[in-house]
Every structure is written in structure tokens, then in C-alpha cells.
Amino acid sequence: MGKNLLRKVWDLHKVRTLPSGQDQLYIGLHLIHEVTSPQAFAMLAERDLKVLHPERTFATVDHIVPTDDQKRPFKDDLAEQMIQALEGNTAKHGIPFFGLDSGLQGIVHIIGPELGLSQPGMTIACGDSHTSTHGALGAIAIGIGTSQVRDVLATQTLALNPLKVRRIEVGGRLSPGVYSKDIILKIIADLGVKGGLGFAYEYGGTAIEALPMEARLTICNMSIEGGARVGYINPDRVVFDYLEGRRFVPKAEDFEKAVQYWKEIASDADAEYDDRFQLDADTLEPMIAWGINPGQAVGVDQKLPVLKELKEEEREAAQMAYNHTRFRPGQPIKGLKIDVAFIGSCTNGRISDLREAARRVRGHKAASHVKALVVPGSQSVAEQAAAEGLPEIFREAGFQWRQAGCSMCLGMNPDVLVGDQVCASSSNRNFIGRQGSPKGRTLLMSPAMAAAAAVAGEVADVRQFSQGGVA
Amino acid sequence: MSRSTAEIREISGRAVAVRGNDIDTDRIIPARYMKELTFDSLGRYSFYDQRFDSSGKATDHPFNDSRYQGAEVLLVNKNFGCGSSREHAPQALMRWGIRAIVGESFAEIFAGNCSAIGVPTLTVGPKEIEELMKQVESNPATKLRVDLESRTLQAGDTRFSFSLPESQAKVLWNGTWDTTTTLLEGLKEIQAAVVRLPYVKDFSYDRSGSGRAGGEKTGGA
């Protein structure tokens, strides 16, 4: 039997077996941001340790940056302190920092791939659970806590337990109006938010192979929402073409050598897996996560579940979700009124996401009661969008066009829900309080569906949505 | 980091139960309280939005209940600590006073973060956790004794077995749960491993500053 990509990358990066039985794994790329790194740098200072490989760590600022007024000092003193700490720490240790004036700043999981820092066959770590995103390039990318950020800074390695691999085969092909976001929401709904505990998810099959690079990043991004710390897709021509010519990607002859390695690192045709799961993309419809975890999702034509129709182990969570959302069991999801629409985040803040949203918005107006926000995932995405005239399309439709950052995904910056607002969101988590208001309600969906909801003022089926014009 | 070399073999104390599956780290500590440069004062924000309503009034959350103040063992259900990788979550619980967590299952990053700060995450079955929770809820003064060597937990007159990953048990037992020290002991092996990597040996990052950063190539399929 052959080996899967996880096994190959793991073996190649294994430094040694630790006395605890864990493996010590070398980390090829370490990404840091302002929220989970200052304490790690403080721990280094306490022990008089240096950063072992500063050339393998890259920093940016994303969680706390305001997306409207980025003038320094920030109005929020705490946010200002955090960015200053990162500026100080990166300067002191010689770590490259993509700050607000670099033109390359953005959400850490957007800029890693777009700068070509994230590459196939690498191990990647970052103090953020959505690090799984980078697996879409064929890397093993692991979200870590702050003590582990300290470990990587000091040793460029991590102590890790081995992972099992579940092959997720998505057959068929997506229909128009259905996106990779819908695939991953469906996978999480089927396997559950704890289904991936102890597993890495390997996504494959015709529907996955047909996806462009950015759509693949969305899938791997949300692996963690299914409990899988790692998600990846075997690298292929789509990945190589995406990477070629990017800033940190090897050029000329070195690029050929890299591609050689990237091809070899993919799972063998007869690779072994610990588990398998199949899904058919043909019958998939746009999905909406309505509850208080991303696994509580229904298709746009479905009704919210009635408790007694659910499996017994899902009822308690559904009841809690109804207690929080005050939605009605059995009500159709379509037509559910929204107050806010958020298009952005590390899940869906890339140029292709903004293009799809703009296509739905063009020639329309956001409903008068809806506050609609478009937040590019990086300064490069913003620049590309501007070159294509997307900000004008959004502004004319009454959407706010913002600057790059995590924005309304997580309630750490001025972009937050107020009271019990309902938000159609292209982000990744609908946890209670996630968008900054303890009573706020989050509906997760694709950016095209969020755009359609903004215009309709309620959850709408993007497939039935008349387009003002086709970009 | 005064605790960084302590051996952890036994934990005794009262317990507090926080019921519910899939309690995510946003609920354990809301993101708005993470705008701090140190972990020192996070204890007060544990379960903040569950403990206080929008007017700031305290709810009946167990962490507000005077009978559970000073509890050192936290009892939870399934998939505790899912979501965000924020170490702020276990740090907040630890600084509130929690020294061990007993539950049906834990999210992986959370369990790793707990281990890294010397807080064991112990797994018991659904029946056992229910029994433990009931016992503690009916008598908050119940003393629990967690013995990492025998992997048993004594609550009043009842004894339970728990499971704990061998790797976590070993490092806690030996006092080597601060991984940086252990990892640095392999410095020679680290250096040997690096030079084997194709992206070090055969090719490397282009640092000339040339090339694109922007989004997906335009005009392509």
C-alpha cells in the first residue's frame, strides 16, 4: 500500500520521537499575528531565548485592525498596544512583518498563499485555528496555541500527536450558484462538529479537483469547524499554476525542482486511509448554518429542523440553538429576515469571492434595513478589486467597502453586531457571541448567498436571483 | 513561569460542573477580552457572556455560584474547547483556579493548550460524567482526588477510572510538560532534519521581492 500526503510530509519533517511518545516535527513556515504572539515573545524573553529561524517566521496584523479608519494611533488603545508589540517584537528578532504600510498586509490565511509563502509539502503552523486553510496547497498546516507559538519561535519545531487520515471523496460537480463553501458546510453537517477529532481530512474526488485554488482554500479553512485540526488537498496543476510567479515562490529552474517535489509529495494512488467518507456534489444546494455551531446547517430549500426529527444526540444542541436564535423549528430558512450582511474573512475574503458577490449585487440595492459590509481579505485583494471596479459596484448598491482585516468574523475590532441582529455572513463560525454581540445571530453561507440576502433583506436562493448584469 | 518544572501527579480539590456539549473557546473567553498583552488578568473573563447579562447583572452560571468558588476541577461534557485555538481559554480557566478538567471529550487544540500549561484533560464516559456532575451539584463540598499514576478519580466514596493520552500523562508526571525545554534538547537533530528538506536542500523561498502578491490570476479559468 502507498502512503498518503500527511504520512509523507510527517515522515520527512520528523526530527525525532520525544520521550513522551509524541513526534517532534520541523515547521517549514510559521505565521504570526498580533493576538496570539505577544505572550509567546514574553515567554522567550523570560528565558533569554532567541528566535531560532527568524527567516522562517512571517508576521502580519489582522484581528484587531479597524477596517474603516486605519490612522495611527488606533482609536482603541488596546488595539494600538497590540500592533506596537508586534512591530517591536518583529523588529527585535528580525522577522519580516507585513504591516499596514507594506501594501501586502491582510488576514494571515489570505496572505500566506497569495505571497507564495505557503507551498505544497511544507509543514505550516500559526497561532490560529484556521491555519488548516493552507492545506489547500498540499501542505500540512496546523493551528496552535500561544505556548506552541513560543515552541516554534524557539525551536522551529512542535511536539505533536500523530493524526489519522479520513479521505473525503466529493464526486459529481457543483451546479451554478453552489460553491465550495456549500461543500464544506455539508460535510460538517453530515460528519458533525466533533466528527474530525483525531483526524486530518484529505479532500478529493472530481468536484474537488475541478475547483480553482481559492475555492479549495475555503474548504480546507473550515476543516477545524468539523473538529479536524488539519485538512488538505493533494497538490496538482491548479496549485502549481496558482503559485508560479508569486513573490516567495522559487523562480526558473528552482521552480521546476519545486514542482518535482510537489508532485512526489501527493498521496499515492493506492494510499491507505484510516477512514473514508463520500459526498455527491450533483445534488448539493446552497447551505446555511443557522444555529450556534457550523454543523447546524440546512439547504436553502429546507426548513429548520423540528427537534423530534433529529437524531437524539443532536436535540440538546438544537434546543440550545433555538433558545439563542429564537428562530422557530419548522420554519423555512428562505425568507428569514436579516439585519447585517458581511462578506469577507479568511474563509471567503478573496478576489474570486468578491467577484461572485459583486456579480449578484450589480444593478441592485441592498435592502434599506440591511447594513452590508464588504471587507477584502488583504491589501492585494483590495488592489485587485479596485482594478476591476468592484468597490464602485458595491458602493452603488449601498454596501460599505472597507480596508483589509478580520473585521466582523470575530468581534475583536470595531466591526461587531449590535443586540440580537441577524447577520448573513461569509465567515466560518456562528458560535454564540462570535460576531461581538452576546445576543447576535449568525447565518453562515457563501459570499454569493450573503450578497443575495443583503439585496433581498432576507435569506434568498442565489440560484433564483435575477442578476442586474453579468460581469 | 514558576510552575514550569513542577511534577503534577495528584490534584485534589472541589469541583464545578459546566454542562453542555460543544462549548467553544469563544464562549470560554469572548474575543474582546483578548486585547491584552499578557494572560495575567484573564481569569475574571472566564465564561464572561454566560456569567453576566447585557446589563452586567450576574446570572446563575456555576462560576458565579458562591458554593463553587475555589473549585479546582472542572467537569464538562463533549467536545469541550472547540473552535478558536486561543490559549487564552485554558489560561483564563487556570487563572480562575482550575487545575484539571474532566470531560467526555475535548477539542484537540484545546487539549494541547491545556497540556502545555500543565492542566490535564481527563476523559471519562457519559455515565461517569453524569454521576460526577450530579454528585458535585448535590454536594458542592465534595472533594475530588485525581491520581495521574493510577488514572483514577476519587469523588466522595466513589472511584472512577479516566483516560489520559500517554504522552500527556508522561510529561505531567515527569514535570516536563513545558515543551520548549524538551524540544531544544533535540537541537542537533533539528539541524540534521532541516538540511534533508527539499525546500531547503534543492530550492528555497525567493527573497528578491519580485513576483506577484495579488489575488487569483485574472482572465484564467
Image (cartoon, coloured by chain):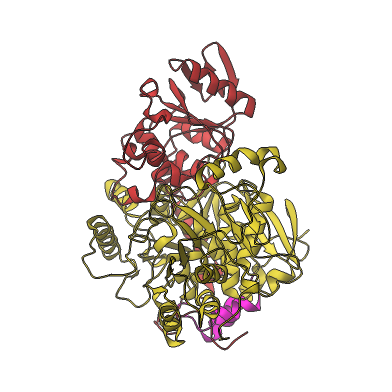
Chain colours: A yellow, B red
Q: Is residue A229 visible?
A: no
Q: How far across and how far down the image is residue A247, in percent?
A: 45, 80
In the image: residue A466, left or right of residue A145: right
Quarter in which the C terminus of chain B is drawn: bottom right
Q: Is residue B138 above or below residue A224?
A: above
Q: Is residue B20 above or below residue A141?
A: above
Question: Can you tell which quarter of the image residue A178 is in?
Answer: bottom right
User: Residue at horizontal 34%, vertical 35%?
Assistant: B95
Q: Which residue in the rendered view is the most extreme toward the top? A: B157
Q: Is residue A161 visible?
A: yes
Q: How far across and how far down the image is residue A384, in percent?
A: 45, 83
Q: How far across and how far down the image is residue A362, in percent?
A: 51, 82
**Image label count:** 0
Q: Which of these two is toward me, A423 or B82?
A: A423
Q: Which residue in the rendered view is the most extreme toward the front? A: A368
* A245 inside magenta stretch: yes
* A366 inside magenta stretch: no
Quarter in which the N terminus of chain B is drawn: top left
In the image: residue A417, left or right of residue A284: left
The boundaries of the magenta stretch are: A235-258
Q: How far across and how far down the image is residue A238, in percent?
A: 63, 78
In the image: residue A187, left or right of residue A391: right
Q: Which of these two is toward me, A158 or A187?
A: A187
